[in-house]
Amino acid sequence: MESIKEIRTHIDSVQQTLKITNAMYLISSSKLRKARQQLTNIQPYFTKTRQTISDILHRTQDVEHIYFDRRPNKHHKVGYIIITGDKGLAGAYNHNVLRMAEEHMKQFDDTTLFLIGQVGRNYFRHKGVDIAVEFMYTAQDPTAYRAREIAETFVQLFRKGQLDEVYVVYTEMVTPMTLEPKILKLLPLDRDAFPWQPRQKTDAGMVREVTYMPSPAHVLNHIVPGYLKGLLLGTLVESFCSEQNARMMAMDTATDNARELLKTLQLDYNRARQSAITQEITEIVAGTLGGDEDADWEDEDWA
């Protein structure tokens, strides 16, 4: 059994860990609420842009555009935007994303990595995989500005023919208890992903007519990058929410385990103290009785 001092030191250590895990839980909870609000704020813009693209595609069936161009499969150059966290302590959040990305990358011979998050960077560096672009300081603070910067990078590479397809690997928070890693194809866009949506009627019951100037293709040149930016920002925020939720669950479990360990240690501490007190009492009693017997023996000798 450990000594009283060792058990006391162990209890102090667990109590400090308990404070840290509980604080991390509260911090992740606050960040999660803020990120969910950010996702709600960008939803109207994303929805309207998607409706506009859908309207152009279905009203001008003959429109051809590079963003919808399906290129031949002779030598596909595929880009992967992989979103991980900047640190661990989030359960299997990072591992699940990296595993799905590696499985999907096996389909292609020529892949280019665009990494977001320190964990992903360290992982692929350790495996000796070439990294094309590393976007720093984006995993912990997803913003529209950073999403635009990332979107502009892979859109330019796609337009120049340096990439034939672009995927983003991220984590979606399906429910607070269910986090699901997903792969979303960003480019080229799929026409079937933009279903027909009837135009809204005015208060007088008339259908609003829209004219795209100078041409539908020219309008697509401007709004598709914005749509991709919104799509990418959504995946960044979803991943950030998933990471914070995973960390909340991990820290909540760690806090519960720490409390259970403290109960066990407190029992061990009480037993050790009781054993030490009992031993001291026994030694005192034994010393007292020994002293009385010596006195009786001396009296008998003198007699």
Image (cartoon, grey):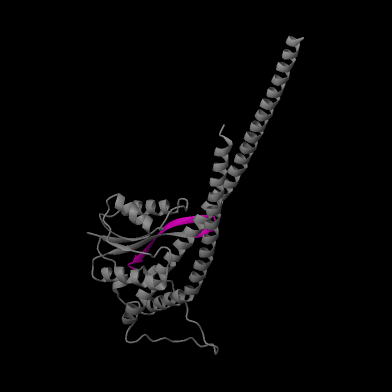
**Residue 278 falls in image quadrant:** top right
Above or below, comparing residue 283 to residue 106 in the picture = above
Asked whether, in this view, residue 119 is left or right of residue 247, the answer is left
Q: Which residues are magenta?
A: 173-188
Q: Where residue 232 appears, x then y in whole percent?
A: 39, 68
Foreground of the two, 137 or 67: 137
Above or below, comparing residue 91 to residue 139 in the picture = above
Foreground of the two, 269 or 88: 269
Above or below, comparing residue 26 to residue 287 in the picture = below
Magenta-drawn stretch contains 185: yes
Q: Where residue 154 appears, x then y in whole percent?
A: 30, 68
Q: Where residue 189 appears, x then y in whole percent?
A: 35, 68
Asked whether, in this view, residue 290 is left or right of residue 144, the answer is right
Magenta-drawn stretch contains 258: no
Above or below, comparing residue 271 to residue 146 in the picture = above
* Number of marks in picture: 0
Asked whether, in this view, residue 284 is left or right of residue 223, the answer is right
**Magenta: main secondary structure:** strand
- Residue drawn 28% across and 60% down? 78
Foreground of the two, 10 or 158: 10
Q: Where residue 245 appears, x then y in whole percent?
A: 51, 58
